[in-house]
Image (cartoon, rainbow, N blue to C red):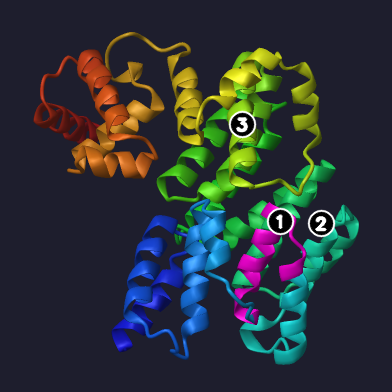
């Protein structure tokens, strides 16, 4: 049982760092843990959180057959995605029963803040969410929601302050979800000052979400990227990316509770045909499309500088010894797509084999 508890703790603590790893650990714990175990609510939390962060809203719902105060974070995020209020009411009733001691402190304010978001009262939501105690996992969720409110209200000063707080608290520990947020938000606010810097930061954020399995946060990330593209004059690209996100939201039931004024302005400028074309793409394909379009602009045809960001990442993973299947999992693409990237890389770098590519990449890394 000690091994189960230890693995469960690792699953929960790795949630903000690597959602794919969390899901594997949570699945193992579920197989080992008796249904009536005292830690059952933590097992459900790990399963639901891992499924939700992976974008699997239906499985996350199933993993929470009843609400426990320790599951408040997942209840809040599910409500924001689905607009369902009943679980929020159930959570408040549970909090009335259990109280808010220890790790549950701030749960009531988080629930009331999310309820205010669903009511469209962002001012009241902000006041509630600011009261969530720090540091805690609930405070991280609360600040992510405060960040969304700042974006919706066009409040750059507050937005940057929240991002700076998250960055200081991370302290280089590699909480990849926070790091992705930091890149995305800073890219969004940089779009009028330096479009190239803005797009580079947004692409870093999207890449981090993809690599570590945070699919739940990918639709908003791609929307922020589409805004940056559109305001840079690339309306066709923005339309396709936005079309893919809107189609995904419709298929998955993953709604959006926060308005984003520049996104509404962008929609009014788009050619419906480009949005319709994007709707035929999956999120995976939209990510690849955005990367490809960025990579193909202003690059030479041959040599290391000709590699797109995705191709460069594939080379890095090949050099680390990963097979195509694992590379595909890390990059959120199919094995066939990885093979296509490698064909392009071989041509651009004039190499013939995987071993030769790995050797060249290693040699180049040592020289840099």
**Circles 2 and 1 in contact, beta carbons < 8 Å:** yes
Q: Residue at x 51, y 60 (%)?
A: 59
Q: Quadrant of the C terminus?
A: top left
Depth order, front residue of 253/267: 253
User: Please, what is the dominant secondary structure of the magenta stretch?
Assistant: helix
User: How busy is the neighbourhood of tag 1: few (under 14 within 10 Å), some, or many (20 plus)?
Assistant: many
Q: Quadrant of the N terminus?
A: bottom left
Q: Where does residue 228 sit, x and y in percent of width and height?
A: 66, 27
| Residue 210 location, quadrant | top left
Label 3 and label 2: CA atoms lie apart by 23 Å
Earlier along the polypeptide chain: callout 2 or callout 1? 1
> Looking at the image, is 109 positioned above or below residue 118?
below
User: How busy is the neighbourhood of tag 2: few (under 14 within 10 Å), some, or many (20 plus)?
Assistant: many
| Residue 67 location, quadrant | bottom right
User: How busy is the neighbourhood of tag 3: few (under 14 within 10 Å), some, or many (20 plus)?
Assistant: many
Which range is magenta? Answer: 69-87
Q: Which mark is residue 66?
A: none
84 falls in the magenta region: yes
Choose mark 3 or mark 2, whichever is in front.
Answer: 2
Label 3 and label 1: CA atoms lie apart by 21 Å
- Would residue 234 be visible to someone looking at this image? no
**On the rendered structure, is 78 left or right of 151?**
left
- Would residue 243 be visible to someone looking at this image? yes
Residue topped by disc 2: 117
Residue topped by disc 3: 225
Earlier along the polypeptide chain: callout 3 or callout 1? 1
Label 2 and label 1: CA atoms lie apart by 8 Å
Depth order, front residue of 213/172: 213
Residue topped by disc 1: 80
**On the rendered structure, is 287 left or right of 166?**
left
> Looking at the image, is 120 positioned above or below residue 280?
below
């Amino acid at each position: 049982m000690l091994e189960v508890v230890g693995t469960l703790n690792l699953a929960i603590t790795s949630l903000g760092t690597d959602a794919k790893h969390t899901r594997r650990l949570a699945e193992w714990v579920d197989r080992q843990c008796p249904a009536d175990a005292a830690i059952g609510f933590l097992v459900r939390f790990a399963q639901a959180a891992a499924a939700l962060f992976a974008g699997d809203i239906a499985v996350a719902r199933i993993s929470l057959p009843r609400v426990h105060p320790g599951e408040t974070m997942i209840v809040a995020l599910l409500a924001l995605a689905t607009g369902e209020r009943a679980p929020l009411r159930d959570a408040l009733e549970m909090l009335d029963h259990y109280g808010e001691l220890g790790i549950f402190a701030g749960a009531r304010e988080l629930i009331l803040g999310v309820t205010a978001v669903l009511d469209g009262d962002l001012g009241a939501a902000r006041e509630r969410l600011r009261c969530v105690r720090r540091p805690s996992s609930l405070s991280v969720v609360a600040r992510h929601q405060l960040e969304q409110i700042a974006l919706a209200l066009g409040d750059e000063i507050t937005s940057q302050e929240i991002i700076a707080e998250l960055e200081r608290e991370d302290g280089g520990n590699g909480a990849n979800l926070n790091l992705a947020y930091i890149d995305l938000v800073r890219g969004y606010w940089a779009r009028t000052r330096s479009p190239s810097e803005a797009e580079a930061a947004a692409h870093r954020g999207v890449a981090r979400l993809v690599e570590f399995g945070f699919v739940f946060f990918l639709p908003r990330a791609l929307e922020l990227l589409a805004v940056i593209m559109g305001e840079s004059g690339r309306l066709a690209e923005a339309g396709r990316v936005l079309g893919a996100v809107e189609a995904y939201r419709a298929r998955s039931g993953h709604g959006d509770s926060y308005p984003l004024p520049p996104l509404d302005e962008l929609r009014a400028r788009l050619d419906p045909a480009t949005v319709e074309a994007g709707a035929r793409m999956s999120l995976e394909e939209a990510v690849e499309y955005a990367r490809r379009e960025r990579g193909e602009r202003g690059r030479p045809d041959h040599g290391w500088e000709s590699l797109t960001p995705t191709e460069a990442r594939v080379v890095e993973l090949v050099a680390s010894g990963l097979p195509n299947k694992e590379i595909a999992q890390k990059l959120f693409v199919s094995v066939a797509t990885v093979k296509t990237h490698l064909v392009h890389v071989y041509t651009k770098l004039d190499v013939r084999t995987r071993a030769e590519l790995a050797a060249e990449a290693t040699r180049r890394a040592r020289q840099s």
